[in-house]
Amino acid sequence: MPATRPGVRGAVITGWGTALPDTVLTNADLEKQMDTSDAWIRERTGIHQRHVGGSTASLSTASGRAALEMSGVDPADMDALVLATTTPDRAVPATASTVQHELGLACGAFDVNAACSGWVYALVNAHGLIAMGADKVLVIGTDTLDRITDYTDRNTGILFGNGSGAVVLEAVDGPGQLLSWDLDSVGEAESALFCEIGGVLQMEGREVFRRAVRIMVDSATKSMRHAGVTADDIALVIPHQANTRIIAAALERLGIEYERSSIVLDTTGNTSSASVPLALAAALDAGRVDAGDLILFVGFGAGMTAASSIIRWSPDAVEARP
């Protein structure tokens, strides 16, 4: 995939928000439901707890509203809503339509399903809408994985939880923040992680690990090459929050220290489409991002999909690109 081309109308993130269900499912809770232990889960995944409950629409509405309030954008002025989710509340219509109504938006609204890569897919699509004339786009990543997770299954039940993260993108008179992007899919590997309609998640753990590290590194490397930057230039990595071993292995191969990543999965688990915006919001709220910093988003998901992008953080279009 190419770098963002010169002259393309750009955008900046002007607001963000998150939402997590109130109910917490700890590793100690899982010890009562399956043959596992808190120490075993932490060692293999880095996860201490995850949140369950809520609906995709309710969590999306909460994170979207928080992002809108931070940005100061009037909901009536929004041009599009893109919701990344692999767990819509209904088969039809798109959950984005429900969220649109709840937020009082008067715009197009649609779902994107690229599993755990979904939010980066949605972010790239939103930039495309802005390049074609949209002024303001709300990008949300939400999953309620407790509805398709068997919490008595030692293979998958320790991993997944619910959550939502959102950002507001606003067009600018300049190139904006997005420097480059890469979207990928390796359909031959879809059997490594899937859920049949009406079923629960099935996963071949070793195959997912093997392919995940490789595809994350490949996608991130492409985005860095397209942007004309190296690993040393990246100030912060926002990876999909699958488990700490996958993240650590991918970062090591990229030559990026683990400390330059934002990690939230210890308290959220794997929230699929929500994981990247949740980790982004955590870094921004903690003051870990300065104007001019390069941020690398990178993830993988069922499909197997992969996605990455690089932005130069700045609310000012003039400073968004050197």
Image (spheres, helix red, strand yellow):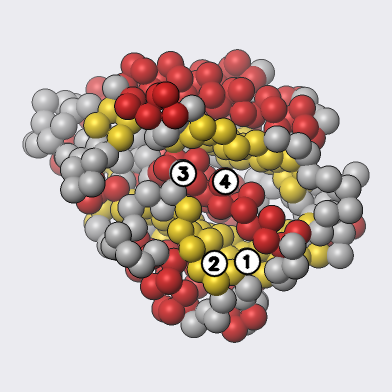
Where, quadrant-wise, is the N terminus in this rendering? top right
Determine contact: label 4, label 3, CB under 8 Å.
Answer: yes
Depth order, front residue of 140/17: 140
Is residue 305 left or right of 208 when viewed as pictured?
right
Sequence-wise, the earlier of marks 1 and 2 is 2
Tell me, yes or no, if residue 230 can be seen here: yes
Kindly identify which residue carries mark 3: 114
Gap in angstroms between the C-alphas marked 1 and 4: 14 Å
Which numbered circle lies on residue 137?
Answer: 1
Kindly identify which residue carries mark 4: 120
Sequence-wise, the earlier of marks 1 and 4 is 4
Kindly identify which residue carries mark 2: 81
Q: Give neighbour class at mark 2: few <14, some 14-19, many 20+ (Cα, 10 Å).
A: many
* SS state under label 1: strand
Gap in angstroms between the C-alphas marked 1 and 2: 6 Å
Which image quarter: residue 223? Answer: top right
